[in-house]
């Protein structure tokens, strides 16, 4: 296990990924306490995968995380070839992400104050992930360029995103009002120079949701990122720009927001309703032909 940590650190895996991989391999070792890793083979991996699914009702993402961790351990630590048993994953479910309406965003902001409001404004105005906001430093706020530099993105990718003028004013007010000014990170915990814990950020956002009567919403922090992307799309921003702002490596990940557009969907006319207005329908078709 120590060797696995060294290999992952040398490959510059994030601390979060290292902990996740270590956890999965440790659970596998505990499942086979009498069997050394050198004697793990495909049968053991498949049996454990089935155990996760049948006994613990593990999700597809959990099974995939285990398979990736086992693959890394086999290939990089004990130096044996290994093929991911992807056919054993539960079938992936397609679920639309949680998105707040514009009115719900206004309602949420109306019930948030101080640091809490700054955090929510940053999530919604920039599309940052939780860990990205947690590790955001004051020097990453490039006010003169109206942008935020994200240095700790997923996969250690660096990118730029939008800096809202309203959010900038909120951040300046927040900074002026702080008796103990942040030293390094924009939002610091009780220890100066150390970032605020992710759970503290989540708790702060959750309280705002509760006060705004939106506690029924799921994935409270990530819903703000989804809302950012969906509302940009509704306002006419192209999907490729949104992909870059979100830091997605594949455009396929971004296209899920096409399912959530409200303006285009609300403007659609059902074929049943169009039965009573055939002339209107024909004129719309003619206009479309001319545009083409």
Image: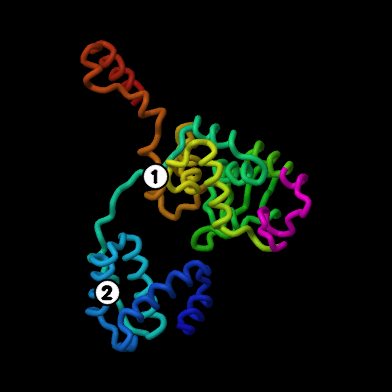
* Rendered location of residue 158, percent (x, y): 56, 57
Residue 178 counted in the magenta span = yes
Q: Residue at x 29, y 88 (%)?
A: 39
Q: CA distance from mark 1 to mark 2?
A: 30 Å
Determine crowd level at label 1: few under 14, some 14-19, many 20+ residues with C-alpha closer than 10 A.
some
Please name which of the two marks, 1 or 2, marks the residue nearer to the observer.
2
Side of 134 relative to 239 (left or right): right
Residue 166 in picture, x, y percent from top left: 65, 36
| Nearest the eye: 187 or 160 | 187
> What's the residue at 60%, 45% (across, down)?
122
Q: Quadrant of residue 196?
A: bottom right
Mark 2 surroundings: few (<14), some (14-19) or many (≥20) residues within 10 A: some
Q: Residue 85's spot in the image, x, y percent?
A: 26, 70
Label 1 element class: loop
Q: Which residue is mark 2?
A: 48
Residue denoted by label 1: 97
* Range drawn in magenta: 174-192
- For the point 24% across and 57% down, which residue is it? 91
Sequence-earlier tag: 1 or 2: 2
Label annotation for residue 279: none
Element at badge 2?
helix
| The C terminus lies in quadrant | top left
Q: Main secondary structure of the magenta part?
A: loop
The one nearer the camera, 14 or 30, is 30
Task: Name the image quarter holding the N terminus.
Answer: bottom left
In the rendered view, how is the structure colored? rainbow
- Let me know if residue 159 is in the magenta part: no
Whole-percent x and y of residue 216?
A: 43, 41
Left or right side of 270 for 199:
right
Tell me how many marks there are.
2
Q: Are marks 1 and 2 in contact (CB under 8 Å)?
A: no
């Amino acid at each position: 296990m120590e060797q696995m940590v060294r290999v992952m650190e040398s490959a510059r895996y994030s601390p979060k990924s290292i902990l996740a991989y270590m956890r999965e391999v440790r659970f596998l070792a505990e499942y086979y306490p009498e069997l050394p890793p050198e004697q793990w083979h495909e049968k053991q991996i498949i049996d454990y995968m089935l155990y996760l699914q049948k006994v613990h009702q593990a999700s597809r993402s959990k099974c995939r995380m285990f398979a990736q961790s086992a693959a890394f351990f086999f290939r990089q630590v004990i130096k044996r070839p290994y093929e991911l048993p992807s056919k054993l994953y539960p079938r992936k479910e397609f679920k639309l992400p949680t998105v707040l309406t514009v009115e719900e965003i206004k309602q949420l902001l109306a019930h948030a104050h101080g640091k809490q409001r700054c955090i929510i404004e940053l999530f919604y105005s920039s599309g940052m992930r939780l860990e990205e906001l947690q590790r955001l430093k004051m020097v990453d706020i490039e006010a003169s360029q109206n942008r935020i530099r994200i240095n700790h993105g997923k996969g250690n990718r660096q990118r730029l995103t939008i800096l809202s003028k309203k959010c900038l004013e909120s951040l300046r007010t927040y900074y002026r009002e702080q008796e103990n000014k942040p030293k390094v990170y924009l939002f610091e915990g009780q220890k100066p120079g150390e970032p605020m814990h992710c759970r503290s950020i989540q708790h702060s956002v959750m309280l705002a949701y509760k006060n705004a009567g939106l506690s029924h919403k799921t994935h409270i922090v990530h819903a703000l990122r989804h809302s950012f992307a969906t509302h940009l799309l509704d306002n006419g921003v192209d999907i490729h720009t949104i992909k870059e702002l979100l830091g997605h490596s594949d455009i396929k990940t971004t296209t899920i927001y096409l399912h959530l557009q409200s303006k285009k969907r609300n403007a659609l006319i059902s074929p049943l309703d169009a039965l009573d207005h055939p002339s209107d329908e024909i004129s719309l078709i003619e206009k479309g032909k001319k545009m083409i």
